[in-house]
């Protein structure tokens, strides 16, 4: 499927990505820099990480919100990705996690025809599966 890169607007072809190859690699690099920095400096704040890695704060907050960092900045605020309530660990609250579990099979069947909401739910479900592999 052809689409425009969210970052540079170039047309590219990929079934799931919203970034072209180059922007994707660039994004991966930024993510890795932040991740490595936090591994070495687990007590760092969001502002400090941004300053040291030159990755924008918004992007770091995105990584935190998406649950991609195994070490998060000490002043990071975690919110449930579905209902938005504050949580201490993970990316979705216990209640939404329970809801998700029960809808995993039906969501999977419906994702093809539904909108962003179902897609973002699938993303969360995929991330949970990734966690288990670690
Ligand atoms: Zn691009
Ligand atoms: Zn929730």
Image (cartoon, rainbow, N blue to C red):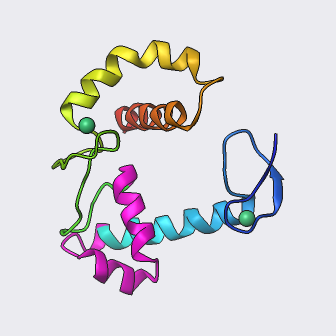
114 lies left or right of 99: right
Expressed as whole percent of the image width and height from the top left, the position of residue 37 reads 35, 73
Residue placed furthest toward the left: 88
Percent across and percent down for residue 67 are 35, 50
Is 24 in front, or is 105?
105
Residue 54 among magenta residues:
yes
Q: Nearer the viewer, residue 82 or 60?
A: 82
Locate residue 62, reporting x and y percent. 41, 60
Q: Quadrant of the C terminus?
A: top left
Side of 46 where 122 appears, left or right: right
Q: Residue at x 49, y 19 (%)?
A: 107
Dominant secondary structure, magenta? helix
- What residue do we see at 39% from left, 75% from top? 57
Which image quadrant shows ligand 1? Answer: bottom right
**Residue 121 lies in magenta, yes or no?**
no
Quadrant assignment for the N terminus: top right
Q: Nearer the viewer, residue 5 or 71?
A: 5
127 relative to 95 in the view: left or right? right
**Placement of 43 over or under 24, stated as above or below:** below
Q: Residue furthest bottom?
A: 51
Which residue is drawn at the image coordinates 22% and 37% (left, top)?
93
- Magenta region, residue range: 39-68
Looking at the rendering, which quadrant does residue 6 occupy? Answer: bottom right
**Residue 102: quarter of image:** top left
Measuring from the top left, give residue 49's x and y in whole percent: 33, 78
- Residue at 48%, 65% (x, y): give it: 31
In the image, residue 95 above or below residue 103: below
Depth check: give the residue in front, 50 or 41. 50
Numbered-mark total: 0
């Amino acid at each position: 499927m052809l689409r425009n890169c969210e970052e540079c607007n170039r047309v590219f072809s990929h079934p799931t990505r919203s970034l072209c190859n180059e922007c994707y690699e660039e994004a991966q690099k930024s993510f890795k820099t932040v991740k490595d920095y936090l591994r070495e400096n687990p007590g760092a704040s969001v502002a400090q990480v941004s300053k040291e890695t030159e990755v924008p704060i918004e992007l770091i907050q995105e990584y935190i919100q998406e649950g991609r960092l195994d070490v998060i900045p000490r002043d990071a605020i975690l919110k449930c990705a579905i209902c938005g309530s504050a949580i201490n660990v993970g990316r979705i609250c216990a209640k939404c996690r329970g809801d998700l579990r029960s809808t995993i099979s039906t969501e999977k069947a419906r994702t093809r025809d539904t909108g962003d909401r179902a897609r973002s739910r699938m993303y969360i479900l995929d991330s949970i599966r990734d966690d288990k592999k670690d």
